[in-house]
Amino acid sequence: MRFPLVTSFCIASTIFVGSAFVGYKAVRFVSYHHSESRAFDSLGKQDAQELRTMLQTFTFLSHSRIVTKFEPSAANYHSALERNIPYLQKLRDHAPDQLRPPIDLRLATDYAEMAQFEKKAGHLAEADKATQSAQRILSSLGWRDLSADALNSLADQEIQPLRISEGKK
Amino acid sequence: MTRIMKVSFVLSAVLGIAAGGAFGYSEGAELGESMRSIEPLAAGSVVSEFAAYQFHHADLEHARQAALLEISVREQLRTVAHNSDVDGALGLAYVRLAMVEGQAGNKAAESHAFEEARKWFSPPRPGQELSDERLKEFLNKMDEYGHSIPSEPKVKLTQ
């Protein structure tokens, strides 16, 4: 009789922990999205929706920058850029027209950085391709100088913290 | 399996879901609150930086569009957050627009934008207005430092 009691207690405990975990995850998800969907309701439905879209778009954009900018090593930085570019393109595709230019600038910066990495690795064809992508986007943003120096300067501003941290090592 | 065992298992599941749900509900609501305080900062930073880049590198029309986008976003942010930082950032967005109009040679539009900018800053002393040059200087310093997020605009602008 003692053995089934212990087994039952163990099974019941496992069920409790499993259910608590599932309940926690599900309710947290629902609660967060409910709270997000109700935010700014006082502004009126359309204004609140516009504000939510703008905030989410720029928060994702800001997050994508943090993810690449603070990568600890050059190898990780390169792969973070490779992941970030399609992510930004997807974000751009879903963003309203008026919010696209800041995403475009971020994309151009990533391409400029990518071009530098590829050039240093001796992948000249890939470097040229990335350079052309950056120039095409910056031209659409009205940039006056699309030279290699201008692109390097744009990329350097992003890579600088990485270089400083690597220099310290 | 006895009936008691079945009941205790069902009870364990129900209690587990209730306990996890209660914890998850409060955490989800807290997460939502945190995001609502982080998102305006991130959005403001993105548009300020974009306007600064465009001002220094793009043609006047694109720089103007970027400045107008920053003003539009900052005004939207003001509908949900009222404090001196938000107001100062909106003021600086108008200074950016004024500088673009100044470069374009649109004196009337430049003056109008500076007037709009001044509305968002407290005057250094009662009855004294911040000069256009002082506002320009402040924005230029912000651009040199990084991008236009004022921490204490009232203190730094005091002459």
Image (cartoon, coloured by chain):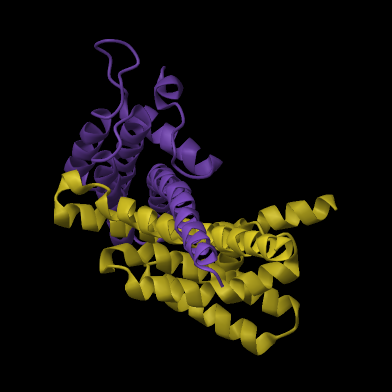
Quadrant holding the C terminus of chain B: top left
Foreground: A11 or A166?
A11
Residue B89: which quarter of the image?
A: top left
The colour of chain B is purple
Q: Position of residue A132 (x, y in %)?
A: 52, 81
Residue B54: which quarter of the image?
A: bottom left
Q: Is residue B89 above or below residue B20?
A: above
Q: Position of residue B120 (x, y in %)?
A: 27, 30
Residue B118: which quarter of the image?
A: top left
Q: Farthest front residue?
A: A1
Chain with colour yellow in the figure = A
x 22%, y 57%: residue: A49
Q: Is residue A99 left or right of residue A146?
A: left
Q: Is residue A85 left or right of residue B67?
A: right
Quadrant holding the N terminus of chain B: bottom right
Q: Is residue B36 above or below residue A150?
A: above
Asked whether residue A62 is in view, the answer is no
Q: Is residue A160 above or below residue B138?
A: below
Q: Is residue B121 left or right of residue B18?
A: left
